[in-house]
Image (spheres, helix red, strand yellow):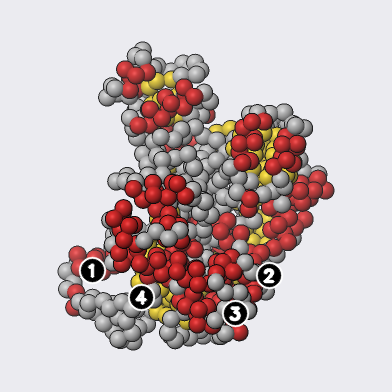
Amino acid sequence: MAKMATKIALGYPLDELQNPLTGNTYASFEPALDYVVVKFPRWPFDKFPDAERKLGTKMKATGEVMAIDRSLEGAFQKAVASLDQTIPKLKADELMGHLQQPTDLRYFALLELLRMGETVENLQTATGIDLFYLHTLKNLTDMEQQIQSYSIDQLPQSLLKQAKLFSFTDAAIAQLMNVSEEEITQLRKEYKITPSYKMVDTCAAEFEAATNYVYATYAGVNEITPLPQGKKALIVGSGPIRIGQGVEFDYSAVKAIESLKKLGWTTVMINNNPETVSTDYETADRLYFEPVTAEVIASIVEHEQIDLVFTQYGGQTAINIAEELEKLDLPLAGVKVDVLEALEDRERFYAALKELDIPHIPGSVCHTFDEAVSAASQYTYPLLCRPSYVIGGQGMMTVNKEQELKQALIQTDERHYPIVLDQFMTGKEVEVDLAADGKQVFIPEIIEHIEPAGVHSGDSMAVFPSQLPDKVKEKIYSFAEKIVNYFNYKGIMNIQFLLTDDAVYVLEVNPRASRTVPIVSKVSGTSLIDLATKILVNELPSPLGDLPEPVFEHIAVKYPLFSFHAMPELDHKLGPNMKSTGEGMCIGSSVEEAMSKVFAALPNVYLDKDVCFIEDYELDVPMTTLGFKDWLETKEASIYVNTAHTEEAKQKRVQALKYGIEVFSEKDTFKAYLDGLNAKGTMPVSLPGSQKEGVHAG
């Protein structure tokens, strides 16, 4: 659309603009679609269960998925499968409430009411939703009941075929029948029920099309022949944007595709997020717009005869299904699942660190509620309660007493056990992104967080390159190299550390691309994704052999962005559970200059004392003499500083946010703002290597 709109703006008429999907029709030709698309929002309420779930004119979704199929039933099912989240259990007496004042759970409440026997007519009266859509949902619940009425030995081929036409996954059918997913997959293959692949061509196959934009369906015959023989790579995408997993993984996927193409590989992309560059049909050699699940990936690998499947660039979504993919004997690029588990499993990871003589935070791995309560008694509160296999610190919290721990454990999903209980320690957090070939390690530099330990890395401001002493840097580099060599790790990795006055501790290792990879790569002028990709395809000699150390002429500051306006009822006091929905970066010749650019939209407290209201601690900073409530009403009110953990402090922060005031909940963040005021002017700064880009006078 953007390409066509640009050409129209330049004066081209529609009948002169060729349709890039078909290659032989024009934009003046009315599209004909033989498929249906469902767009489904991805809300952050799994991160914020206490937030107001009611939907209205204010957008609360952080992302969305898109699904394509030949039926509306199938497209709805694919969209839900693409959300990559567990739907909470709904109480029977609350179902109608989700409809009368619509919430993010309205779709699932409708399905549950239909399962309980509610009529589509009553639901139409209660919601105003068109009967067409309600009958579509009724078809799904009717299918569930039919499936449940059979044992696996009696399940008719025609019914299994119809279930797959409605995009019921093998896992969903297995759950309905109380059998294993493998049994359903085996039966489906015996019945020769396999997906067909069709083209998104905008002309309903009326004309021949030239696109490689593909979706799967169980309706009709296959229209897509495998890409020509040669080295083929499948890049697993990260799905919808959500807190903790955003466009940084799209960056990684696109850069991997570019690197693979340069190396002579044919690239195939699977993802379901319509907002990304990786789902532009012109990025990879072929795009499969599908849910990122093991069942779907296995079918694509078989159809295309894929040589390598890349899971390091798809965030936690891709890493979490790596075990399933390996069990299916799919050719994973790089590290084996046993290594992934050794890095994710705290017991095995701590044992490895002990063998390597690398300090880690004292902690225990707990597999049950009782284990966690018992283990906590061995430590002094506060403790950091950390679920397994999550991103963005979901469910992670600092607990200050046993009652808080018990409440946190009650709210933890079973799939996130074992729980890790770590002794909470104060200090500075730093992290590194690296590329490794099993022996050699390349670390451009260290990322130094501004806020103290206990604030999630995604919510912390950070300086790159770091301003740490060389002695500390050398220890961090040494620990990283030891970990890589011990696990014979190949590809890209992120390691987080805690620095105290007298020690360097390893906090965790992420065996994948992280959210800071774009920043590190752009500022250092060295693409970590390119290096990792060459290593993962066994490019020889190793690209790390003669790699020069980057030379930094400027300093970058990464800063988080929060969607406070969407959920102002929440206290956005920073902590271990990530809250930011995006980030930005500013560059300067000094840390102060970069900071001044970050906070350029805020007024200078030294020039007008009434812009600022500070609580909790004393600083030599001018501030208003008005009371809090009176100050909120003034037009000068711009900056509110409150770092306390009390209920009163929470309510004041919430109130300030509702007035559109910038709230600082950490002393170090406010100090960074003050440091920026000391900058001696600012100048535009370009990224390394970008000076050659742009328009040149001829």
> Residue under circle 2?
327
Badges 2 and 4: C-beta atoms under 8 Å apart?
Answer: no
Secondary structure type for disc 4: loop
- Residue 331 in percent (x, y) is at 65, 73
Secondary structure type for disc 3: loop
- Residue 607 in percent (x, y) is at 34, 21
Mark nearer the viewer, 4 or 1: 4
Badges 2 and 3: C-beta atoms under 8 Å apart?
Answer: no
Disc 1 packing (10 Å; few <14; some 14–19; many ≥20): some
CA distance separating discs 4 and 3: 32 Å
The residue at 67%/33% (across/down) is 383
Whether residue 587 is situated above or below residue 481 in the rendered picture:
above
**Which quadrant of the rendered structure holds the C terminus?**
bottom left
The residue at 46%/85% (across/down) is 222
- Residue 664 in percent (x, y) is at 45, 29
Which badge, 4 or 3, comes first in the chain's sequence?
4
Which badge, 4 or 1, comes first in the chain's sequence?
1
> Residue under circle 4?
35
* Quarter occupied by residue 656: top left
Which badge, 1 or 3, comes first in the chain's sequence?
1
Disc 4 packing (10 Å; few <14; some 14–19; many ≥20): some
Disc 3 packing (10 Å; few <14; some 14–19; many ≥20): few
Left or right? Give the position of 494 relative to 262: right
Q: Nearer the viewer, residue 480 or 137?
A: 137
Whether residue 511 is situated above or below residue 296 in the rendered picture:
above
Kind of residue indicated by mark 2: Lys
